[in-house]
Amino acid sequence: MLNCLVRNVSFPGKDKTYDIAIHQGVIREIDSSITAEAAKELDAGGNLVVPPFVDSHFHLDAALSLGLPRFNQSGTLLEGIEIWNELKPDLKAEQVKQRAMEMLRWSIARGTLAVRTHVDVTDPSLLALDVLLEVKDEMKNWVDLQLVAFPQDGLLRTKEGKELMVRALEKGVEVVGGIPHFERTAEEGRKSISWLCSLAESHGLLVDIHCDETDDPNSRHIEHLTYETLRMGLGERVAASHLTSMHSMDNYYVSKLLPLMAESSIQAICNPLINIHLQGRHDTYPKRRGLTRVPELLNAGVNVAFGHDCVMDPWYPMGSHDMLEVAHMGGHCLQMMGTEQMNLLLEMVTTRGAEVLNLERYGIAVGNPADFVVLQAKSVMDALRLQPVRLFVFRRGEVVASTPPSTSTLNLGGETSSVDFHLKR
Ligand code: FE2
């Protein structure tokens, strides 16, 4: 007898509904009508099922620290970094852990079950890193947490930055991070990239660089990162996060850059919520949106994923770790509302994110772990438009989060009726 049978789910782009058979945490069968008996049956009501959401760029060490020790009044990246540096010496392991655990509880409720989090390793105590390694282990049954050793204050700009990076890797971090545009000079930025890529190459690790998170079109570290990716043959092991300067770059230069990126197999991460919030802050009008060139990167053959980046921290006061909110913002700011583009938006918070994280056995397929999310929606468009309730979040065949369907009841002149915000015709 099967452990569980989920009946009547819709897959994106498919007309008929399917059943999913689960046994011992693994998807055993997917078919339009499964007759086997199961210990537990659940009717999904024809609602849409998607793989768990993947957040390919997050800062779990800072999440939910909003207002500590003060709020960001200018809304700039640099004031955010100042505030974080005021908080950093006072970080207490217990509080960092409590915030991280609470954040991940929100993530799970939203169906976000894989998170790549950068963790600041320019604090000589490496306190936040030790805490997040603990959190990663304690939460591994529910969330795949991938840690990036991130030199927030600059690798070369921080006293003993290189030593701290090496120590972080010795503790078991799997991804090497960097922030070349924040080093003292462009030349130092390039040197940091070369050093970090060599380190990742020699340790067999992944790379994820905060790259050109600025409106300055002359910030071109992506070119050097791409070059080093090619030269060392690192390929899809390397991701470039943010890339906001590409928004402002000269079109002719970008026409050379895009094929070079595709040739190297480097992956790109855009953070729509945070980029639209932080970029263009030195502009009067017109104000640049600052998001990197996502449709053009995709057209060039570069894999792109979306990250949430921040939730209620020194950089961003909003958010609840809902990757559909990220995709919704991306659709607006990047003007990706064509039907095929909407499918891409969903991919960038699911399958394309899984590619960036190099996740194995990801996706709703026979033989894979039974990890998926049933949304209160019938189509991809409705999933993006409504960011609907996550009716059921499955992890290894168990329902780890559930939320009752949302309905509104109207009372118009004594006559009651319900509204569910789906187009009926
Ligand atoms: Fe970031």
Image: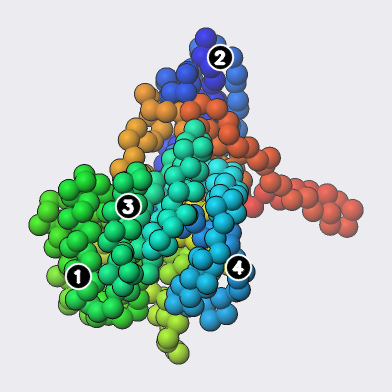
Residue closer to the observer: 28 or 116: 116
Relative image position of residue 223 (x, y in whole percent): 18, 68
In the rendered image of this protein, does residue 36 appear above or below residue 341? Answer: above
Q: CA distance from mark 2 to mark 3?
A: 49 Å
Image position of 19 (left or right of 247): right
Question: Disc 2 residue type?
Answer: Ala
Residue closer to the observer: 293 or 353: 353
Relative image position of residue 383 (x, y in whole percent): 52, 49
Question: Disc 3 residue type?
Answer: Arg
Say the numbered circle drawn on residue 190: 1
Residue closer to the observer: 72 or 31: 72
For mark 1, does the 10 Å Cα neighbourhood hold few (<14), some (14 to 19), or many (20 or more) residues? many
Q: CA distance from mark 4 to mark 1?
A: 33 Å
In the rendered image of this protein, does residue 359 appear above or below residue 260? Answer: above
Earlier-in-chain disc, 4 versus 1: 4
Say the numbered circle drawn on residue 68: 4
